[in-house]
Amino acid sequence: MIAILIGTNRLGSRTRLVGAQLVRLYHELGEEARPIDLGLLPIEVGSPRAYADRPAEVSRFAALLGEARGIVVVLPEYNGSFPGILKLFLDLLPHPSPLEGKPICLVGAASGRFGGLRAVEQMQNHLLYRRSHPYPYSVLLSDVEMLLAKTARIEDPATIKRLRAQAEGFLGFVASLAPEKG
């Protein structure tokens, strides 16, 4: 199973639409994919007590990340970085982290011309710190509002081709990191 982590809790987020499209894409490729939507986290995650009394939804999401063969993080760029809710969620993950040793792929989404480049670069550094295995080929979605404007789905053939190539490559990367059976 591939977990698709929606890296925001913003209402009406385009990131959520991109994540839903990625779930469908991985299903087309024959891989089970499950979304993990940070918009479903309870307000208690922002409490100072959340570190001592981890909200049940954080534990449930952490278990899904642990079960996943690989993780795709769809992250928007807000104010030159990734969203605070994503950092808070990562901080609340148990130790050892379900990210450790896990192949992780990044898709940036932004209104600007650089497609979330700064957020993706910062997330790559965080993932290396967490001892995960970042997939080296990120997809950056620029002008995401225009990409999703007509049908709330990406229909641009070149963008779909890039997302498909990334997904196919990522599945190969995941398989290459899987422990040998036998």
Image (spheres, grey):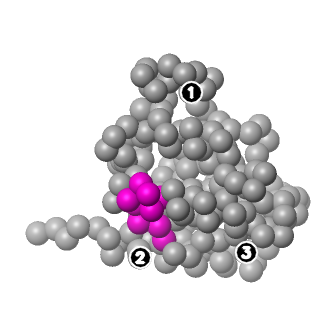
Residue highlighted by disc 1: 45
Q: Which mark is residue 159?
A: 3
Please tell me how crowded label 2 is: few (under 14), some (14-19), or many (20+) other residues with Cα within 10 Å. Answer: few
Locate the C terminus and report the quarter of the image it occupies.
Answer: bottom left
Q: Percent x, y for residue 96?
A: 31, 44
Confirm whether residue 69 shows in the render: no
Left or right of 29: which side holds 177? left
* Amino acid type indicated by mark 1: Val
Quadrant of the image occupied by residue 112: bottom right
- The residue lying furthest to the left in this view is 182
* Contact? badges 3 and 1 (CB < 8 Å): no
Residue located at (63% from left, 39% from top): 85
**Residue situated in front as seen by the camera: 134 or 22:** 134
Residue located at (65% from left, 36% from top): 39
**Residue situated in front as seen by the camera: 72 or 164:** 72
* Amino acid type indicated by mark 2: Gly
Mark 3 or mark 1, which is nearer to you? 1
Residue located at (37% from left, 37% from top): 94
Above/below status of 163 relative to 150: below
Span highlighted in magenta in the image? 127-135
Residue highlighted by disc 2: 172
> Dot 1: what SS?
helix
Left or right of 13: which side holds 135? left
Confirm whether residue 16 shows in the render: yes
Q: Percent x, y for residue 84?
A: 65, 41
Work out whether mark 3 precedes mark 1 in sequence or the reverse, and give the earlier one: 1
